[in-house]
Image: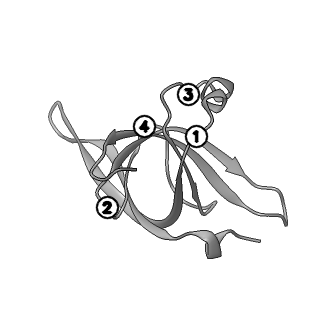
Amino acid sequence: MSIIHLLNKSILIRRLKSIGGFQKGYTTTGTVDAHIQRIEEEDFQYLYGVYGATHKCWIALNTNILRGDKVIDPDGNEYIVVAVDPKDYGTMVQHKELILKIENAKTGT
């Protein structure tokens, strides 16, 4: 079973890659459906060791995303992926849970 019906935003995933010589830059790896939610509980940040995390994100299990990738939502907010946790419980709800840190806020998220 999937969580596809709960995903309400289309996000852009960008990854830091070599663009020639000694230069690196973010290149787009894809656009996927997601659900992003602000982290409210302060204890959560200490529990997972990601102090400074501001948001959680859920995406499809087969999505190619890595720690350090950049996520951009439709409002133009930019986040850095600080943790990726695949949740594959057999026939139960399958998804990836991302822990994000906002890098550049365009709106009041």
Horizontal relation, residue 23 to residue 17: left or right: left
Mark toward the start of the polypeptide (3 vs 2): 3
Return the residue nearer the eye: 25 or 102.
Answer: 102
* Residue 41 position in % (x across, y down): 63, 36
Q: Label 3, label 4: how many angstroms apart (C-alpha)? A: 13 Å
What is the C-alpha distance between the residues marked 4 and 2?
A: 20 Å
Task: Tell me the residue at 56%/27% (across/down).
Answer: 50
Q: Quadrant of residue 79?
A: top left
Disc 4 and disc 2 in contact, CB within 8 angstroms:
no
Badge 2 amino acid? Asp
Q: In the image, which disc is placed on residue 68? A: 4
Which secondary structure, mark 3?
A: loop
Lower sequence index among marks 4 and 1: 1
Q: Amino acid at mark 4?
A: Gly
What is the secondary structure assignment of the residue under circle 4? loop
Q: Which residue is mark 2?
A: 75
Q: Which secondary structure, mark 2?
A: loop
Front of the two marks 4 and 1:
1
Alpha carbons under labels 1 and 3: distance apart: 14 Å
Compared with 24, 95 (above or below) is: below
Q: CA distance from mark 3 to mark 2?
A: 24 Å
Instruction: Looking at the picture, tell me which residue is in the foreground, 39 or 84.
Output: 39
Q: Pointer 3: what residue?
A: 50
Q: Label 3 near label 1: C-beta < 8 Å? A: no
